[in-house]
């Protein structure tokens, strides 16, 4: 779920940059998920797609390939106007976000951050 080595490679092994990024992601992704939920409730496909795209990039930088794949599926559904499909995928996305946040917290705790 969390590929710490890939994440560190994203930052050329600079641990302090990776830690700062994870700390930021732990705030940004829940905020983006909230915006995604609001957009879904309002049926705003443009905002849904934009938030999904943003979360996809954040997941990639945070070494979260499964999260990235799930949100890519949602982004594709948005692009194709498939709001019901987005709704079916949101519970899995929420669960994946919850899981990755736990893994990121554990990583930061282990690293003494």
Image (spheres, grey):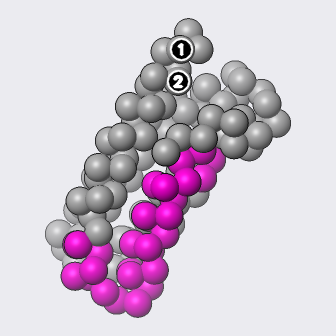
Q: Residue at x 42, y 40 (%)?
A: 100
Image x and y of residue 109, in percent = 49, 15
Q: Is 22 left, or right, of 87 in this rendering?
A: right
The quadrant the C terminus occupies is top right
Q: Is 31 left, or right, of 13 in this rendering?
A: left
Q: In which image quadrant can residue 37 be found?
A: bottom left
Given the current orientation, which residue lies at the most extreme right position? 12
Q: Residue at x 29, y 59 (%)?
A: 92
Quickly name the residue at label 1: 110
Q: Specify start and end residues of the magenta stretch as a single range.
A: 60-88
Q: How far is the residue under mark 1 from the one under mark 2?
A: 5 Å
Image x and y of residue 5, in percent = 69, 36
Q: Residue 113 lies in magenta, yes or no?
A: no
Secondary structure of the residue carrying tag 1 is helix
Given the current orientation, which residue lies at the most extreme left position? 41
Question: Within 10 angstroms of label 1, few (less than 14), some, or many (20 or more) residues?
Answer: few
Q: In which image quadrant can residue 9 be found?
A: top right
- Between 54 and 96, the one lying in front of the other is 96
Which disc, if any, is residue 33?
A: none
Whether 101 is drawn above or below 49: the answer is above
Q: Main secondary structure of the magenta part?
A: helix
Q: Is 46 left, or right, of 38 in this rendering?
A: right
For the residues labelled 1 and 2, say whether their Cβ atoms are less than 8 Å apart: yes
Quickly name the residue at label 2: 107
Whether 96 is drawn above or below 90: the answer is above
Q: Is residue 66 visible?
A: yes
Image x and y of residue 17, in percent = 70, 29
Question: Within 10 angstroms of label 2, few (less than 14), some, or many (20 or more) residues?
Answer: some
């Amino acid at each position: 779920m969390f590929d710490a080595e890939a994440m560190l490679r994203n930052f050329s092994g600079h641990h302090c940059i990776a830690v700062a990024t994870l700390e930021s992601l732990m705030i940004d992704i829940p905020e983006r998920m909230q915006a995604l939920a609001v957009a879904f409730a309002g049926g705003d496909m443009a905002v849904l797609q934009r938030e999904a795209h943003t979360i996809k990039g954040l997941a990639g930088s945070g070494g979260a390939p499964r999260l990235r794949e799930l949100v890519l599926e949602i982004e594709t559904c948005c692009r194709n106007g498939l709001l019901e499909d987005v709704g079916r995928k949101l519970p899995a996305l929420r669960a994946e976000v919850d899981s990755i946040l736990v893994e990121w917290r554990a990583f930061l705790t282990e690293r003494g951050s």
